[in-house]
Image (cartoon, rainbow, N blue to C red):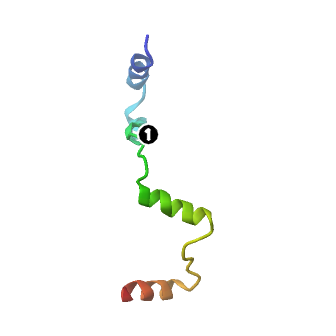
Amino acid sequence: MSNREFAKILIDQIPDSKMYYVVAYLQGISVPDEIPNAETLASMEELERGGGTVFTGSTADLFAELMEE
């Protein structure tokens, strides 16, 4: 018996009240792994080197700054 067949058998034994959790989990793992594009990789490298802007003000200051942009 394959793992897929075994999983189908197990799913039939799960009560409907818990099926939400199974569906949510399956949706999460069924999405193919995405490979980051070059811009994302460059941003990640910059952050790992300690680069990038870190905001240290208050929440109100942050929203005020965002509204100006």
Q: Nearer the viewer, residue 32 or 9?
A: 32
Quadrant in which residue 39 is drawn: bottom left
Location of residue 2 in the rendering, given as x and y in whole percent from the top left corner:
43, 14
* Residue 41 drawn above or below residue 51: above
- Tell me if residue 23 can be seen: no
User: Which residue is drawn at the image coordinates 40% and 25% (left, top)?
Assistant: 11
Question: Pointer 1: residues within 10 angstroms few (<14), some, or many (20+)?
Answer: few
Q: Nearer the viewer, residue 12 or 2?
A: 2
Of the 4 image quadrants, the one containing the C terminus is bottom left
Give the mark count.
1
Location of residue 5 in the rendering, given as x and y in whole percent from the top left corner:
39, 17
Of the 4 image quadrants, the one containing the N terminus is top left
Q: Nearer the viewer, residue 57 or 69?
A: 69
Q: Which residue is mark 1?
A: 25
Give the residue type that dot 1 points to.
Answer: Tyr
Quadrant in which residue 26 is drawn: top left
User: Which residue is drawn at the image coordinates 42% and 28% (left, top)?
Assistant: 14
Local secondary structure at mark 1: helix
Location of residue 57 in the rendering, given as x and y in whole percent from the top left corner:
57, 86
- Tell me if residue 65 can be seen: yes
Side (left or right) of 21 relative to 46: left
User: Which residue is drawn at the image coordinates 39% and 35% (left, top)?
Assistant: 19
